[in-house]
Image (tube, coloured by chain):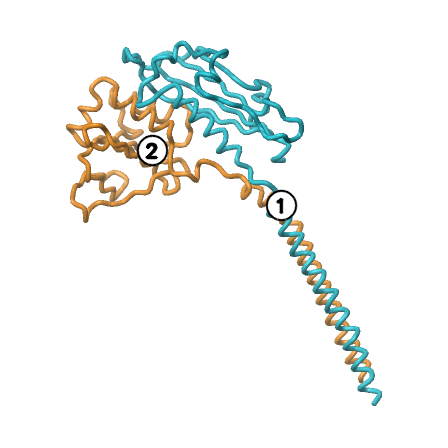
Amino acid sequence: MNNKAQIGETMTWMVGTIIIIIMLAMSVFILSSSLFENDRKISLRSINSDLIVTKSFLGYLLTGDNFNQLRNTELRLVTDSVSRSDDEIVKKIFFELGSNEYSGDIWLGVLKEGCGWNKDTQTNVQPSCAPNKRKVIASGCITGVFYDRIKLNDDSIAELMIGCKK
Amino acid sequence: MNFIKNKRGTDKVLSVYWFAVLFIVVTGVVYMTFLYYGKPYDVRDIEANLLLEKVSDCLSNGGRLSGEWNSINSENFPEKCSLNFNVEDTGGWKKDQYYVNVKFRNFNEDSFSELAEFGNPNLEIFCGKSVVCSEREFYTLDKENKQYSIKIKSVVGKTEKNE
């Protein structure tokens, strides 16, 4: 009876040890595999800025009468489905020039300082100067929308929003 | 009496066993920590994009091309854009771990003209394999309001450190 108890206890320890070794070996194997390879790669996608798009946006504002047009209307929405001739340049600048990051709708606007856009739905973007209605939209592609805000010399703010590809 | 003796013996054997298991677990945890944190972070994507942004800043500012952009060529490119391709002393690296290529075109045309290149052009062949490449294009105007598209490609090697 005593011997049986000793054998039982030893068996428990042996099985326990084997399980621990198997679990450790599995953990080491998983860690050394390429599963965590992407964790070691840090990319600019996680940083909320895109200087290249900002440059294109500034170039666009300087082109022709674009700045004044945007300032007067305060908001311009360019979508994939709308194909106004003067929107072609917008699509070409933000979709076709090199970056494959963006798609969907583009919102462009020049607002008075302190004003912003309320983005309630994909198609309903309204300029708003009421602080309590101002919806803060994070920049960068993490939230699915790239948001750029440039302060101009005349104290107005040029804003750009582009849908990001997932 | 016999029972007490056996019990003590069993305890001794088990404590050796217990220490052995503890040793295995600690070794395993240390090894796993080393496996995970021992490898360097691969920041080449950020490096390539920073290089690209620096070159774009050198060529265009505030939406317009700088006055001297037309005079930039492969010879004076590093000097005009303050580029320094010195690298850390690893694996016999010299100044051959980076490459930048700048092309431009009239916005309404399709074909690009080469503006300048600098660095090791052989790296470009390995884009998408062992090296990290970044290519972006932006829209800008010159002083006469002519529309241009500038395409910049930057490549970072440093494969030995990031395998």
Q: Nearer the viewer, mark 2 or mark 1?
A: 1
Is A73 or B100 nearer to us in this picture? B100
Type of amino acid at the residue the image marks with label 2: Gly
In the image, farthest residue toward the bottom: B1
Chain displayed in cyan: B
Quarter of image, res B160: top right
The answer to whether one can see residue A107 in this image is no
Q: Which residue is mark 1?
A: B38
List x then y, in percent, for residue B68.
37, 12
As helix, strand or loop, the secondary structure at mark 2 comes to strand
Q: Which residue is mark 2?
A: A104
List x then y, in percent, for residue B10.
79, 77
Mark 2 → mark 1, Cα distance in angstroms: 41 Å
Which residue: 49% across, 12% down? B74
Image quadrant in which the N terminus of chain B is located: bottom right
List x then y, in percent, for residue A26.
66, 54
Q: Which chain is mark 1 on?
A: B
Q: Is residue B56 left or right of residue B91?
A: left
Q: Which chain is mark 2 on?
A: A
Type of amino acid at the residue the image marks with label 1: Gly
Chain displayed in orange: A
- Share a chain, discs 2 and 1? no
Image quadrant in which the C terminus of chain B is located: top right
Q: Is residue B18 left or right of residue A133?
A: right
